[in-house]
Image (cartoon, grey):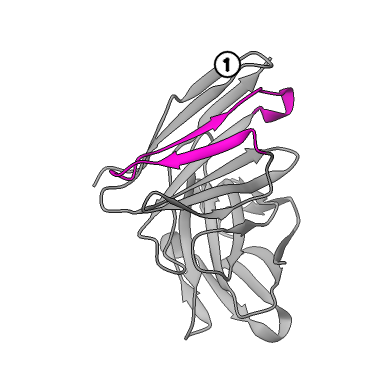
Amino acid sequence: KAGVTQTPRYLIKTRGQQVTLSCSPISGHRSVSWYQQTPGQGLQFLFEYFSETQRNKGNFPGRFSGRQFSNSRSEMNVSTLELGDSALYLCASSEGQDASPLHFGNGTRLTVT
Amino acid sequence: AQSVTQLGSHVSVSEGALVLLRCNYSSSVPPYLFWYVQYPNQGLQLLLKYTTGATLVKGINGFEAEFKKSETSFHLTKPSAHMSDAAEYFCAVTKAAGNKLTFGGGTRVLVKP
């Protein structure tokens, strides 16, 4: 099976702009989670979608949003970008049951200037 | 709230020596525990997980971890380090349904020849 695919791999945006990141999960996986990774804060949970419904949400401002489509593909959007949003954004998919292992993509590196 | 503490942000070991990475967690209910590895410019890969049952868990690449409830620990070991083990290692915990993982700060392993 193909792994988790995230596009684009790298992004450079200007403060105040918005950005959309895309994630294609492993075939058959119904859960998609998003994490932000920064040197200062480490890995932080953004949100999880299961069968098109947000099942869990982390402690991020409303500028961060996401959605999941009927084919399980997911997008996350960040509006009004701030310098502090520069990070590696990781998407992970799983079958969705308790403690089912997460399969991570290679991430999207977002740089905000 | 759950939390994970990884003792030591950097560990240096000689090739062939024991690798020991420490992880302590706090959780109000029995947790699910994971170890992930991240190689440069890549996402995270699952090494092993503990859910219930046997407290000594064997994972990929010769790694294993032991769940000790009395010590709230889940330390990761490998008897003999290999150069390819140089990477960053993350301990993570979850207790709820879904996939909201709380990660430790990570331990970067350097393997010396």
Q: Residue at x 49, y 82 (%)?
A: B52
Left or right, residue B82 beside residue B6: left
- Find residue A100 and report its horizontal and vertical position in percent: 42, 65
Assign a secondary structure to mark 1. strand
Q: Viewer-proximal residue, B109 or A8?
A: A8
Above or below, A63 relative to A1:
above
- Find residue B41 and report its horizontal and vertical position in percent: 52, 33
As drawn, which residue projects farthest toward the left? A1
Q: Residues within 10 Å of mark 1 (few under 14, many from 20)?
A: few
Q: Residue at x 63, y 72 (%)?
A: B74
Left or right, residue A104 beside residue A62: left
Left or right, residue A95 beside residue A59: left
Q: Viewer-proximal residue, A78 or B17?
A: A78
A85 in the magenta segment: yes
Which portion, as a residue range, is magenta? A62-86
- Find residue B56 and report its horizontal and vertical position in percent: 51, 80
Q: Residue at x 72, y 81 (%)?
A: B71
Amino acid type, residue under disc 1 in the picture: Ile
